[in-house]
């Protein structure tokens, strides 16, 4: 019997039990959408608990990919369900933006799941980390629980990376502790999850505010970087499919300068030209779509995607024989756009904090004899 796998099984079973309790209380409070999402999540935890128990008692032996999939509790649907559940209780539209980019990212990485499924798992954990940090910064109804959701996403992403690089033992019960604390806190706050009463603002040090904002920006950039890679490779793969080319796979671990890249075999040189241009243009088009049709935070996301898309296009621009001086010029503009987007995100958070303080600040009572 393998003790680590047994601990994993027990931790997943505990998560399933906490989800059942949380969903039951949510049903009683008529918070139906949140309750159904949490209840659906519990079945994935239960499946992971059963699989880890089977492997712990040596009834079957898992492959490395199966170990990561079950160890992460099939984190792709779990991340989607938790995103929906947290959106229902916070009404934060940024979660919808993150989830939309995440869904597009899954489509791009899903062309050859057997080669880089671990990247999908990594991005799923990164989505939970991003949502958790965003909820903590926004000081929503689940601000305390969101800290543990962010911890779960961070440790899960780290273990996914280390499991593929260093053959790390599947110690998934450690990330599960963070998620268990998040569910436990949400159970205690269940009766207040659907209330929107104003809370008294509490003072916070400048260091704590800057630290939370820095973590959020770093997580957001990492999430958008991987998502823009997916959008970039979708452009190559979709153009190749429309032109009748053979799209083999997306290569992530390569010594070539255009890493990552999509292996596309076309019959003529003109098709290669269209394939290269499509990979460069799709992130730009998607970013411009968000920039012109969105507002506030969504525009900042569009600027970030445009900037990262330019940074990822060095190999394609070189193959298109674009002079190096123009590539450097494009990089300078991309860095400028990225700095503007980061400043806009910071301004939106600071402005919202000041607005909240003004709304919750009690009005001063008039003095005796003073006219109202």
Image (cartoon, grey):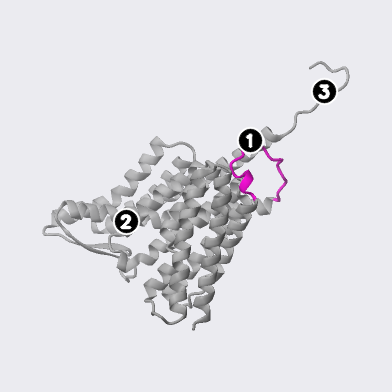
Tell me which residue sits at (71%, 40%) in the image. 200
Span of residues in magenta:
189-205
Q: Which residue is mark 3?
A: 366
Image quadrant for the C terminus? top right
Q: Position of residue 32 (x, y in %)?
A: 51, 44
Indicate left or right for 364 with 317 as reference. Answer: right
The answer to whether marks 1 and 3 mark residues whose Cβ atoms lie closer than 8 Å is no
* Residue 272 in picture, x, y percent from top left: 18, 56
Q: Nearer the viewer, residue 304 or 212?
A: 212
Mark sitting on residue 108: 2
Residue topped by disc 1? 355
Outermost residue, bottom side:
1
Seen in the image, is 104 located left or right of residue 248? right
| Predominant SS along the magenta part | loop
Q: Tell me which numbered mark, 2 or 3, is placed earlier along the sequence.
A: 2
* Magenta residue check for 193: yes
* Residue 31 left/right relative to 362: left
Q: Residue at x 54, y 57 (%)?
A: 19
The reply to whether dot 2 and dot 3 touch (C-beta < 8 Å) is: no
In front of the other: 316 or 83? 83
Q: Is residue 48 magenta?
A: no
- The answer to which quarter of the image holds residue 118 is bottom left
Q: Is residue 361 left or right of residue 147?
A: right
Residue placed most toward the observer, 64 or 49: 49
Mark 3 lies on a secondary structure that is loop
Q: Is residue 337 visible?
A: no
Residue at x-position 32% and y-position 65%: 259
Q: Residue 336, relative to residue 2: is it above or below?
A: above
Residue 51: image location, x then y, percent: 43, 72
């Amino acid at each position: 019997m393998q003790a680590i796998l047994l601990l994993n099984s027990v931790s997943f079973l505990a998560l399933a039990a906490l989800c059942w309790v949380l969903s039951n209380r949510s049903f009683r409070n008529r918070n139906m959408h949140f309750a159904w999402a949490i209840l659906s999540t519990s079945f994935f935890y239960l499946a992971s608990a059963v699989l880890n128990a089977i492997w712990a008692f040596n009834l079957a032996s898992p492959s490395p990919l199966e170990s990561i999939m079950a160890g992460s509790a099939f984190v792709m649907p779990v991340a989607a369900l938790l995103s929906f559940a947290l959106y229902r209780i916070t009404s934060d539209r940024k979660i919808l933006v993150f989830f939309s980019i995440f869904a597009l990212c899954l489509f791009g990485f899903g062309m050859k799941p057997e080669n880089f499924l671990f990247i999908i798992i990594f991005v799923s954990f990164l989505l939970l980390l991003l949502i958790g940090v965003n909820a903590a910064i926004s000081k929503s109804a689940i601000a305390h629980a969101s800290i543990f959701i962010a911890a779960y996403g961070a440790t899960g992403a780290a273990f996914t990376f280390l499991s593929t690089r260093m053959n790390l033992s599947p110690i998934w019960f450690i990330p599960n502790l963070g998620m268990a604390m998040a569910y436990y806190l949400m159970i205690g706050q269940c009766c207040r999850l659907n209330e929107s009463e104003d809370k008294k603002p509490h003072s916070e040090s400048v260091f704590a505010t800057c630290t939370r904002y820095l973590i959020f920006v770093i997580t957001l950039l990492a999430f958008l970087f991987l998502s823009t890679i997916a959008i970039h490779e979708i452009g190559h793969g979709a153009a190749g499919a429309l032109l009748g080319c053979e799209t083999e796979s997306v290569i992530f671990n390569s010594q070539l300068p255009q890493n990552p890249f999509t292996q596309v075999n076309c019959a003529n040189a003109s098709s290669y030209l269209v394939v290269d241009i499509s990979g460069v243009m799709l992130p730009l088009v998607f970013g411009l779509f968000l920039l012109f049709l969105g507002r506030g935070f969504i525009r900042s996301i569009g600027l970030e995607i445009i900037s990262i898309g330019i940074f990822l296009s060095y190999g394609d621009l070189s193959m298109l024989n674009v002079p190096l001086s123009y590539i450097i010029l494009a990089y300078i503009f991309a860095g400028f756009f990225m700095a503007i987007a980061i400043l806009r995100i910071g301004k939106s958070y600071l402005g919202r904090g000041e607005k909240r303080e003004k709304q919750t600040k009690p009005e001063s009572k008039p003095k005796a004899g003073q006219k109202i």
